[in-house]
Amino acid sequence: MAAVLDRVVAINPNDLTTRVQRAFVDLQWRGDAKPLHNAIEASVARDEKAAAPISDRWLFLALCEHDKIAAERALAVLARDGCHDEGIPFPRAWCEGMVEQIGGDQTAARAAFTRAREEIESLLLEQPDYAEDCAFWR
């Protein structure tokens, strides 16, 4: 995957989403957060609002680093439906709960996680045959 993404970046060096995805590989593969940190900072420096496509990776990095300020900034541009990992949806309320948890506010975190559970329960009732949601949340 790293080699493929390196080729894509070489072809289109201004594609920040691909740069972030390539740097994410280093975090997953080697536990090296610095390339991801640099790629996200470069993206955010251009326009924080334009960082929405990479906000899930930004949030993940902030959670890994227990950086509540960065997590809140990522959450501010995160899509309304939350984030996804390997096709598995995590409601925005779950993301909010994670941010509260790293900030130490267990009461706010629990409230957010409860909202997330309610959202998923509602989704499962509406779409009981939607495999991506059902397999993970049941």
Image: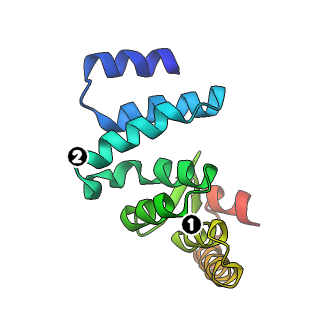
Give the farthest residue toward the right.
138
Task: State the image coordinates of residue 43 (x, y, percent, origin top left).
Answer: 31, 43
Please give the name of the residue rendered at 71% of the width and 58% of the height, measured from the top-left corner: 136
- Can you tell which of label 2 and label 1 is closer to the viewer? 2
The type of colouring in the image is rainbow
Task: State the image coordinates of residue 93 (x, y, percent, origin top left).
Answer: 56, 74
Image position of 48 (left or right of 95): left
Tell me which numbered mark, 2 or 1, is placed earlier along the sequence. 2
The residue wearing badge 1 is: 95
**Disc 1 packing (10 Å; few <14; some 14–19; many ≥20):** many
Mark seen at residue 46:
2
Quadrant in which the C terminus is drawn: bottom right
Please give the name of the residue rendered at 51% of the width and 70% of the height, measured from the top-left corner: 92
Vertical position of residue 78 compared to residue 117: above or below: above
Image position of 119 (left or right of 138): left
Question: Tag 2: residue type?
Answer: Arg
Nearer to me, 46 or 5: 46
Mark seen at residue 61:
none
Image position of 20 (left or right of 86): left
Please give the name of the residue rendered at 31% of the width and 39% of the height, measured from the top-left corner: 42
Please give the name of the residue rendered at 63% of the width and 73% of the height, measured from the top-left corner: 120
Q: Secondary structure at mark 2?
A: helix
Task: State the image coordinates of residue 81 (x, y, percent, origin top left).
Answer: 46, 67
Task: State the image coordinates of residue 40 (x, y, percent, origin top left).
Answer: 39, 43
